[in-house]
Amino acid sequence: MSANVTVRGSDDVTASETAAVGQDRIPGIGGGRTVAVVGTGTMGQGIAQVALVAGHPVRLYDSAPGRAAEAVAALTARLDRLVEKGRLDAAAREAAVGRLHAAEDPAELADAALVIEAIVEDLSVKRRLFADLEKIVGDDTVLATNTSSLSVTAIAGGLRLPGRFVGLHFFNPAPLLPLVEVVSGFATDPDVATRAYETVKGWGKTPVRCADTPGFIVNRVARPFYAEALRVFEEGGADPATIDAALRECGGFRMGPFELTDLIGQDVNEAVTRSVWDSFHQDPKFTPSLAQRRLVESGRLGRKSGHGWFSYAEGAERPEPHTAPPAEAPERIAVRGDLGPAEPLIGLFEEAGIKVRRRSGEGYVQLPGGARLGLADGETAIEYYGEEIIYFDLALDYARATRIVLATGEHTSAESLAEAVGLFQALGKQVSVIGDVPGMIVARTVAMLADLAADAVARGVATAEDVDTAMRLGVNYPAGPLEWAGKVGHARVRDLLLELHTRYPTGRYAPSLATARRGYAEEGQDS
């Protein structure tokens, strides 16, 4: 499962793909060699289109009679639309159609250099398919699965030559989205993984290498984006519209988790979360949400059912995020110590005409009324008896953020909150006030994403560069989790998780050894 937000149709191809048409040779598997795709659903057709416009002869096969021929007709229509849009010239279209064939019998795939499977996500069905294919194709044929949730090792387990088996996880829509996870099973020959990597790279894609682990890179590392939003909602910290707005307008994510899971399908998203959780022996870091389970049980699956977290009925109005009313900005503030990743706010305050005095301290803004305004650190405002504490959330870029999120405790007066609201409104920001939730919204989400990313790298799942690339391209994150953690500070990420772990002692927020090591190494460099 993967979901991405795009502005172009799924028929589109990238410039690099279009330029690849007519190449005689492509790194990895030669451009003149046949690529077979088994399964003619949306993903199968998309993969076939990618291989086709890259210059390969393509054979489509489906076990259902007539489906392959229907897929060929559908792909031909897609190529016609590309010509109409000026993305493919007529000659290239004619050549591509000439290379596209429907196979009515698996025996017609015998000369394929690469076979990619895109059928139902059922381990036993996939194993039977590849056992049958192995009897048909040559020993040098690369066999690949597009699975997003099953073990590549398990699928290949019954093969005579499991070394030539690899995972090629494309993202939907395959012709448009650049990322492909190249997954090596336990028995995959390194040379085969390299051939597969170079092949999809030659198709204009951006491949990343990955070990065979539950969720691979994207579906493993992305879980906190959904899970932390659901946790804040379940704790009564904020409503779905406000949480979505915080992650979009403050965090820089393209969509919020509630609107995104409505688009994906609540049943699909919850199933992937549960699959990863089960695969990791119910590790608390991946625990599914009871609120989402109830949504699925009620049949509110999102856009496809007309109702999920939000209603999609005709004329239905989308709930607005909580936005504080206008408040007067303070004329002056005192900044005590270094604000860390929020330090750019100082210049923004000064540009807005607010007088800023720098003083020594532990890293917070002191408001005229005496309240302390600090960056979310995993603690809660109510813990500071006798003090007025207001937290503000982490932002990807405070200058470009259009919304700032605040959290207050029971001891915070309306007057102090108004000063904090007015301070950020003076920067042209909308302000949302949420409950006193540890780590707030963006900060805890980014910390958890960074922790799972660091742990994946330490366990040899993928390199740090490939993890960040996968998360930027696979799910459109505004920055790779490790890149963002580097800007925030690995020690700050570690400390925030430790504070969360103190308040939720279940193991969910305990920083991984990899995150702890990155934090201590950073402190050692700074000392």
Image (cartoon, rainbow, N blue to C red):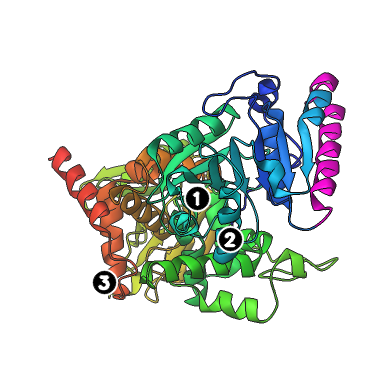
**Where does residue 51 sit, x and y in percent of width and height?**
66, 34
Dot 2 corresponds to which residue? 128
Q: Name the residue under label 1.
A: 251
Numbered circle sitting on residue 502:
3
Q: Give the range drawn in magenta.
A: 65-92
Tell me the crowding category of disc 1: few under 14, some 14 to 19, or many 20 or more residues within 10 angstroms, Cα based: many
Task: Name the amino acid type tagged 3.
Answer: Thr
The CA span between labels 1 and 3 is: 25 Å
Give residue 75's position: percent from left, percent from top. 80, 40
Pinpoint residue 54: horizontal percent, then vertical percent.
67, 27
Q: Is the magenta stretch mostly helix, strand or loop?
A: helix
Q: Earlier in the sequence, mark 1 or mark 3?
A: 1
Query: Which quadrant, please, contains the N terminus?
Result: bottom right
Of the pair 387 and 46, the residue shown nearer to us: 46
Q: Can residue 445 be seen in this view?
A: yes
Q: Nearer the viewer, residue 39 or 43?
A: 39
Quarter occupied by residue 379: bottom left
Q: Is residue 449 above or below residue 287?
A: above
Tell whether 175 sits left or right of 198.
right
**Separation of residues labelled 2 and 1 (CA atoms):** 45 Å
